[in-house]
Amino acid sequence: MTAVAISIPARQPRQFRQLRYALVLAKRNMIKIMRAPEQLLDVTLQPVIFLLLFYYVLGGALGGGVGASRHGYLQFLLPGILAQTLAMSSIAIGQNMNADIEKGVFDRFRSLPIGRAVPLIGAVLAEFFRYLMVCVITIGFGYILGFRVLTNPLALLGAIGLSICFALAFAWVSVWVGMKVRTAGSVQGIMMLLVLPLSFGSTTFVRASTMPGWLQAFVHVNPISHLVNAVRGLLLGGPVASDVGWTMAWIAGLLVVFFPLALRAYIRRT
Amino acid sequence: MSEFAIEATGLIKSFGETKALAGVDLAARRGSVLAVLGPNGAGKTTAVRILATLLRPDGGTARVNGFDVRTQPTQVRESIGLTGQFASVDEDLTGTQNLVMIGQLLDMTKKDARQRAAELLEWFDLAEAANRVAKNYSGGMRRRLDLAASLVGRPSVIFLDEPTTGLDPAKREDMWDVVRSLISDGSTVLLTTQYLEEADALADEITVIDHGRVIAHDTPYGLKRVVGGQRLTVRPVDPARHDDLLSVLGTVAGAGAHAPETDGRGTVTIGVDGDDVLPDVVARLRAAGIAVEEFSLHLPSLDEVFFTLTGTRSAGDARESSEVAA
């Protein structure tokens, strides 16, 4: 036993070690993403295409609905595109985890003395960079088209921070679905069924006042609406406290419900 | 500390209707190799997964390094290495990245993890492929990387689930050498296998399981005694000399061995007690003027072991043929 003891190298401190493990595994997921850059299309090209579509094709018509010109509509639209793209980007993690879990490498993780949730948390943390790309590309491309932030840089950072936090919380829905269903393809199908009504049935593209009353009721509780309204207020000015508060409540709610669900489904899927 | 690094009693595990383990006892002394021998579907992998804390048993108790797999899984995981039947390497990472990641998950500093990775890659003859993505590795290379990954933390108990299945004979010998060097470093190894030959080459003790039950537990020597030692297979050049061959071999057959087995081409297989009968057989064959094409001494196959122990052909055969039919 002595020989073994001598050869054991210096150990890292034990505090925060679960977070350190999660970061090690986040790096693993980052490497995987970098090895298949086509996986980044949903966070790079998609916001560009949606901006172009809604600005040039639909902007002239929809601008009237918000009482604005094509350019005025871009100001209204961009926070919506940001939220919608983030919601759609969260689909990928469920698909990837679904494909990943079938491979033996998760057996390896389970046989290591790390927290059970760590592989999942690591994967979600790696998503941070994808979501940051969404924000940078959407706002950057918006600037080329003529979008302008009317408040201040701090509010801009706040908007990006809130959006990414929401996306990270929403990603747990995708992880849960990814753990529950059999194939990666069905993760996409189910998540699309969820994301499409959420992102269109909101204040993303038009004001709620143009919709029938029952739909307005849905739009007002829809978390995407709260996020869009909060980002709109932070980037363009206007009252934000209520919508920022609601968005944070949704972030907390999504985490409280879907993190344990995802973890349970992951453990059961052994 | 107990003299056993692995101690399991009465392990039970069901998957739905299927009873994978129906009360299995396993024990491996510190610094020894325990081979768990059995056909496909016998419950070997289930037992390993329970001992490695990947599965919870429905019943029974198991301790690894003195820690209960149910109540102290973290302590168990700190002292084990697991190499599964399917190489559990990350295909999108390079060999080095795979091993460094494991090292960091075992609390090594990045520097130490890199050093340990380089050391293991060298040992497993993967140094040249260290910076290639594992996706492009051959099957044998993946196996070796997988084994290397399970040794990063210098575990004192190592589980090898069918480490040589699907490897060619030369690679199998290499793997055996690795197991022997692990033991000389003081580790305890539990390996599962379908080959009596492998169990015989490596194990201090062998537990034979079938249908989730232990049907024999013995040393390799003891087990071979029970199943009738070795087999001698002789094929005459002239199939017509089959009867002469039978009478020559009949004089040297081991005590308690089965009747000679023959096939349509004149080949005869008998059980013998050991290799000391060989010179005698060669001399008698020459005296009788029987020229031979094949003359080989080998261990009984798993199938023969099962036939002897249970009186029925191994369940693995039946299962395989039903799989083919399905």
Image (cartoon, coloured by chain):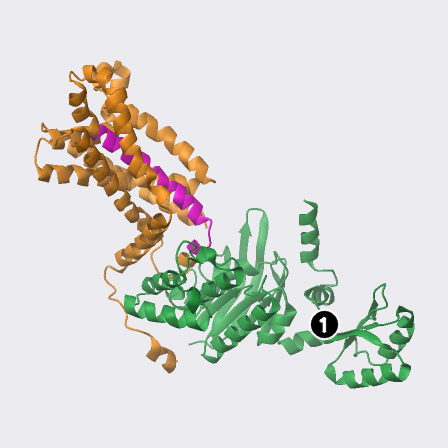
Identify the chain of the residue marked 1, using the numbered disc in the image. Answer: B
Query: In the image, is residue A255 above or below residue B154?
Result: above
- As rendered, which of B67 and B129 lies closer to the eye? B129
Which quarter of the picture shows residue B110?
A: bottom left
| Tally of marks | 1
Residue A33 in sight here: yes
Residue in view at x 26 percent, y 56 percent: A19
- Number of residues whose C-alpha sits closer than 10 Å to that of mark 1, classed few (under 14), some (14–19) or many (20 or more): many
Q: Residue furthest left?
A: A152
Q: Which residues are magenta?
A: A79-106
B19 vs A140, nearest the viewer? A140
Residue B55 in view of the camera: no
Residue occupied by mark 1: B227
Q: Is residue A66 above or below residue A175?
A: above
Q: Nearer the viewer, residue B36 or A51?
A: A51
Tell me which residue sits at (90%, 81%) in the image: B288
Query: Of helix, strand and loop, which one carries label 1?
Result: helix
Residue A187 placement (x, y as % from top left): 41, 37
Q: Residue furthest front?
A: A144
Could you say where residue A42 lies in the image, as x and y percent from the top left?
33, 37
Q: Amino acid at mark 1?
A: Val
Looking at the image, residue A198 lies above or below residue B232: above
Percent position of residue A131, x then y:
26, 41
The chain coloured orange is A
Residue B149 position in % (x across, y down): 42, 64
Q: The chain drawn green is chain what?
A: B
Which residue corresponds to the image point at 21% horizontal and 32% vertical from the top-left? Answer: A227
Residue B51 sits above or below residue A234 on the image: below
Chief secondary structure of the magenta portion: helix
Asked if the magenta segment contains residue A157, the reply would be: no
